[in-house]
Amino acid sequence: MARLIYSAIASLDGYVADERGNWDWSRPDEEVHLFVNDLMRPLGTHLYGRRMYEILLAWEDMDTTNEPSCIADFKELWRNAEKIVFSRTLGSVSTSKTRLERDFDVDAVRQLKKSAGHDILIGGPELAAQAINAGLVDEIHLLLAPVAVGGGKDALPRDVRLDLELRAVRHFGNGTVHLSYQTNASPDR
C-alpha cells in the first residue's frame, strides 16, 4: 500500500504563510531545495488544493536555463508527476498529467493508496487537513524555516489530535530544520 505524505515548509510558529498571505520567507536555499527534490523523487502522484496548484503551476513552463540545477530538477519532478487538483471553483487545469476533481473523496483517496505503485504527496494545508482528519496521512514532513511570523495559514489543522513518532531530524546551514514524523494512520503501526 502506498503512503500518503504531507510535506510543507513552515515558520517556526507553524504557519505556511503569514497573515497577509506572504510566504517569501519560506523560499528554500539550494541545500534545502536539493533535499526537497529528494523527498519528492519517489512520489508518483501529487494531490493539491486549488491554491497550492495555482502557486505551483508556474513550474510547468518556467525557464530554468540560468537557474541552479536543483531548480531545473524540481521542475522536471513536478512536471513528470501525476497531479490531482481538488477544487470546486477552478474552471480547468492547464498543466500536463493533471486532472481536476470537484470534491475530496476520502474513499477514492483510500483506494488510490491501495492501488498506487508509488507513494503519494499531498500538498497544501487545507487539503492536508481534510486527509489528516480522515486518518489518511501516513507521514508528515515539516521543514521549519528560522522565522516566526506571528500568525497566518496554519501548517497543521488545529481541530485534531495527532500522535506522532519522530523518524528523522535534519539541520541545514541556513537554519531550516526538517522533521519527519510517522502518524498513527500508518499501516506499520
Image: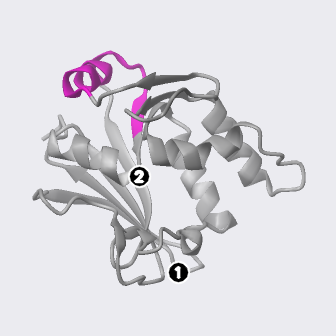
Looking at the image, which is closer to me, 94 or 183?
94
Secondary structure beneath label 2: strand
Going 56% across and 29% down the picture, which residue do you hit? 81
Q: Residue at x 21, y 46 (%)?
A: 132
- For the point 28% across and 56% down, the residue is 181
- Measure how far apart labels 2 and 1 are at the Cα level: 18 Å
Residue bearing mark 2: 7
Q: Which residues are magenta?
A: 105-121
- Name the residue rendered at 15%, 40% in the picture: 135
Amino acid type at image mark 1: Gly
State yes or no: discs 2 and 1 in contact (Cβ < 8 Å): no
Quadrant in the picture for residue 27: bottom right
List the residue tagged with mark 1: 175
- Image height of 167 relative to 14, above or below: above
Q: For mark 2, does the 10 Å Cα neighbourhood hold few (<14), some (14 to 19), or many (20 or more) residues? A: many
Would residue 71 be found to the left or right of residue 7 on screen? right
On the image, the x and y values in percent for residue 53 come to 52, 42
Location of residue 24 in the rendering, given as x and y in whole percent from the top left corner? 59, 71
